Image (tube, helix red, strand yellow):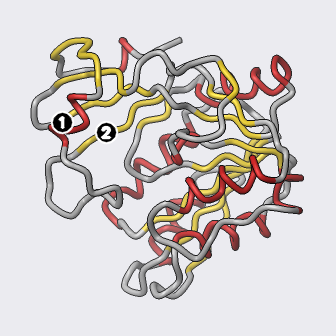
């Protein structure tokens, strides 16, 4: 069973959060949403949550960091595996099913993707970021939006009080505490890169990201290309 945690400050990505959850073929799941802005209406989110199953909504003061919000969510989970979802990316229906297989295959404590698909919305380019980093044990570099870990990890490791780099710190602490960290296959997930200024917490230039990537194609619909 998997508990999904999603912390958000974006009202306009509400439907994306719910769609990523509801589309998962993995049946035994719950979604914990943490609203991290004072002017977001929790009533609107709760109204939408009533149309789904297994969803809990919480609102925390916006001065709380992302790391603190994630730790709050961890304390609320019901299940033994915890997945961290971003509000603005795409998680294909088999994302959880594929990811969970790796726990049996590798006996890892934490899995995630170091090689990922990226879609650059303004250029309509689908690319593979950091190709060749799949299917291996690692000690750094997993994308924060793809982390799934055993709840038992949180007995020793928590996220730091940061808004940026909290996932990097978390992985380092996992390694320090002798947990096994594994980079899984790139399929069933896309990091969506907007060209809007200030949209991304990870404020890195899209041109730089493209230089570190292998272009797959130009397309209006990336979804058929990323399925595993």
Circle 2 residue: 192
Which residue is at the front of the view, 195 or 134? Answer: 134
Q: Earlier in the sequence, mark 1 or mark 2?
A: 1
Query: In this image, 89 relative to 156: left or right?
Result: left
Residue found at the very far front of the displayed protein: 176
Task: Name the element at disc 2.
Answer: strand
Q: Position of residue 148 (x, y in %)?
A: 69, 42
Circles 1 and 2, Cβ within 8 Å, touching? The answer is yes
Is residue 70 shown above or below 177? Answer: below
Task: Name the element at disc 1.
Answer: loop
Is residue 107 shown above or below 228? Answer: below
Quarter-wise, where is residue 34 in the image? bottom right
Number of numbered markers: 2
Circle 1 residue: 121
Q: Position of residue 171 (x, y in %)?
A: 66, 50
Location of the N terminus (image quadrant): top right
The residue depicted at 49 percent of the width and 60 percent of the height is 165
Query: Which label sits on residue 70?
Result: none
The residue depicted at 65 percent of the width and 32 percent of the height is 138
The residue depicted at 18 percent of the width and 24 percent of the height is 125
Is residue 32 shown above or below 97? Answer: below
Quarter-wise, where is residue 10 in the image? bottom left
Which residue is at the front of the view, 180 or 48? Answer: 180
Q: CA distance from mark 1 to mark 2?
A: 7 Å
Characterize the local packing of mark 1: few (<14), some (14-19) or many (20 or more) Cα atoms within 10 angstroms: some
Query: In this image, 209 relative to 181: left or right?
Result: left
Characterize the local packing of mark 2: few (<14), some (14-19) or many (20 or more) Cα atoms within 10 angstroms: some
The residue depicted at 41 percent of the width and 58 percent of the height is 14
Q: Position of residue 187 (x, y in %)?
A: 50, 19
Which residue is at the front of the view, 80 or 137? Answer: 137
Which residue is at the front of the view, 81 or 116? Answer: 116
């Amino acid at each position: 069973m998997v508990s999904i945690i999603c912390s958000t400050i974006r009202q306009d990505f509400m439907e994306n959060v719910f769609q990523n959850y509801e589309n998962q073929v993995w049946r035994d799941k719950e979604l914990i949403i943490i609203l991290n802005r004072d002017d977001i209406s929790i009533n609107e989110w709760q109204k939408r949550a009533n149309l789904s199953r297994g969803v809990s909504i919480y609102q925390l003061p916006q001065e709380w960091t992302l790391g603190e919000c994630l730790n709050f969510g961890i304390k609320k989970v019901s299940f033994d595996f915890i997945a961290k979802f971003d509000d603005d990316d795409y998680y294909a229906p088999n994302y959880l099913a594929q990811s969970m297989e790796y726990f049996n295959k590798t006996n890892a404590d934490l899995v995630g993707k170091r090689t990922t698909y990226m879609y650059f919305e303004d250029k309509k380019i689908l690319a593979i970021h950091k190709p060749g980093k799949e299917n291996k044990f690692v000690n750094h570099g997993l994308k924060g939006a793809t982390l799934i870990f055993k709840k038992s990890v949180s007995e020793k490791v928590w996220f730091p009080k940061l808004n940026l780099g909290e996932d990097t710190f978390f992985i380092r602490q996992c390694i320090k505490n002798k947990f096994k960290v594994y980079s899984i296959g790139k399929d069933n997930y896309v990091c969506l890169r907007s060209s809007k200024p200030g949209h991304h917490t990870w404020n890195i230039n899209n041109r730089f990201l493209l230089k570190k990537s292998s272009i797959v194609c130009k397309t209006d619909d990336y979804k058929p290309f990323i399925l595993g």
